[in-house]
Image (cartoon, grey):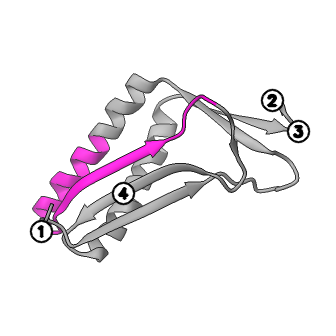
Amino acid sequence: PGSYGALTLFTGCTRSDNPSSANGLLYEGYINMICTVIKEITETLIKESINNDSEITHITFTHRLYGPPVLLSEASMYVQIASKHRKEGFKGVEKFMDGLKEVRKRYDVFTFFFWGGGEE
């Protein structure tokens, strides 16, 4: 508290490249492995920001896993970055999301598509 001047929030929503094809998505993955890599991403971003004097002070990440499917246009993830200035916050969100893409490449994150109450 008091150490940042901007809170940058990114909300990722479920989408389909073909809106008529799916009603929603269900995300599953190996939580322990994913959490380890996400911790690495956040620690790296904070260390880089300290070295570059951009001062990202906090990163919060939430992603819906398991449970009911995430319907189209519903939020599936949230990223919040506290930083000294807004510019660093926006850059931090972009770097975090790029790192998250790497998580999907390195670890199994399964996405199931739902049609009319069914699953594929």
Amino acid type, mark 1: Asp
Amino acid type, mark 2: Glu
Point out residue 79 in the picture as x, y percentages from the top left corner: 41, 54
Left or right of 3 on screen, residue 41? right
Which label is found at residue 116? 3
- Location of mark 2 (residue): 119
Which SS class for mark 3? loop
Q: Which residues are magenta?
A: 40-67
Which label is found at residue 53? 1
**Residue, x 18% and y 71% (percent of image)?**
84
Q: Which of the pair 15/68 is nearer the observer?
A: 68
Closer to the eye: label 3 or 1: 3
**Residue, x 88% and y 38% (percent of image)?**
116
Above or below for 96 versus 7: above
User: Quick one: label 2 or label 1, which is nearer the N terminus?
Assistant: 1
**Dot 3 alpha-carbon crowd within 10 angstroms: few under 14, some 14 to 19, many 20 or more:** few
Give the CA separation, mark 4 to mark 2. Answer: 31 Å
- Location of mark 4 (residue): 80
Give the CA separation, mark 4 to mark 3. Answer: 33 Å
Amino acid type, mark 4: Gln
